[in-house]
Amino acid sequence: MKRFYLDSIDSTNDYCKKNLSFLPSFCVVYTFNQTHGKGRNQRTWVSVPYQNLSFSIVVKKTIAQPASLSIMAALAMIQTLKHFQIEAQIKWPNDILIHKKKVCGILIEAITQDIQSNYVIGIGLNVNTTFFDETLKKKATSLFLELNKKISLKKVLSIYLKKWHKLFVSFKKNKDIILQEYKKYSCVLHQKIEFEYQGQFCNGIVLDILDDGSLLVQMNNKKITINYGEVSLKNFYEEGV
């Protein structure tokens, strides 16, 4: 995979979207100083300069759906952390947690160009952050805080890209196997959750994660499916889901 390094950028995802015509498919744009990173639902992703890793993977003209890309991106991060002897979980749809603390966020953005679907997979990983302020320390962590040692940002990136590329090229043949592996690391599967559904806050139990990435939820006496845009998990940290 071709790599493009930026010494500093507001957002690697925004950079890729603006320069999509000039970037080859399966390239990665990365920086160690992202100044205005973003997450899902217009949230911001704060990264300490030159301590953490921010990167975006460009995927052009693919038949893979956003949910499949999200599953592969999350599972590749789980495998990358395992390389460093770190056990992690996936908080649906695309946060990576260590001991219930967020270490990584993933944002998939679609760009339609000439009636074809292109995607930018944005990933932010806390690698060498040594501390978080009072508002974040109970909800965030880093590889440094888990291992008590600093890790090469380039090494982490290289390992991740190898894991991701292996999953991507085998996804069509091994889709079911990859989905089952993803489920093994889900921290919401078979758990009681509170969520927003059709404008109301509801409770339910997650029965399964379906092929399209949606949740199958038992709510009262009926089963419903919840898509990415329809759900907000509540009380995660307080309840320890």
Image (cartoon, helix red, strand yellow):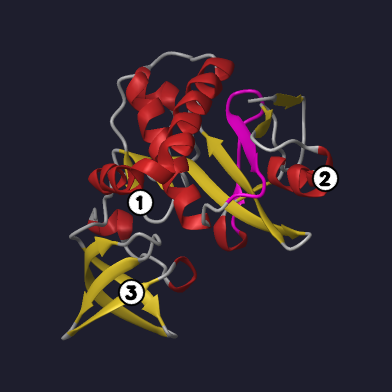
Rendering coords of residue 208 (x, y %): 24, 62
Instruction: Measure how far apart labels 1 and 2 are at the Cα level.
Output: 33 Å
Task: Determine if the magenta segment contains residue 50.
Answer: yes
> Tag 2: residue type?
Ser
Is residue 119 visible in this depiction of the protein?
yes
Label 2, secondary structure: give it. Answer: helix
> Tag 1: residue type?
Lys
Within-10-Å neighbours for mark 2: few <14, some 14–19, many 20+:
few
Which residues make up the magenta segment? 43-62
Specify the label residue 225 is tagged with: 3
Within-10-Å neighbours for mark 1: few <14, some 14–19, many 20+:
many
Residue that badge 2 annotates: 21
Label 3, secondary structure: give it. Answer: strand
Specify the label residue 218 is tagged with: none
> Tag 3: residue type?
Thr
Q: Nearer the viewer's eye, disc 2 or disc 3? A: 2
Specify the label residue 91 is tagged with: 1
Rendering coords of residue 175 (x, y %): 36, 47
Going 31% across and 54% down the picture, which residue do you hit?
237
Q: Nearer the viewer's eye, disc 1 or disc 2? A: 2
First in sequence: mark 1 vs mark 3: 1
Residue 153 sits in quarter: top right
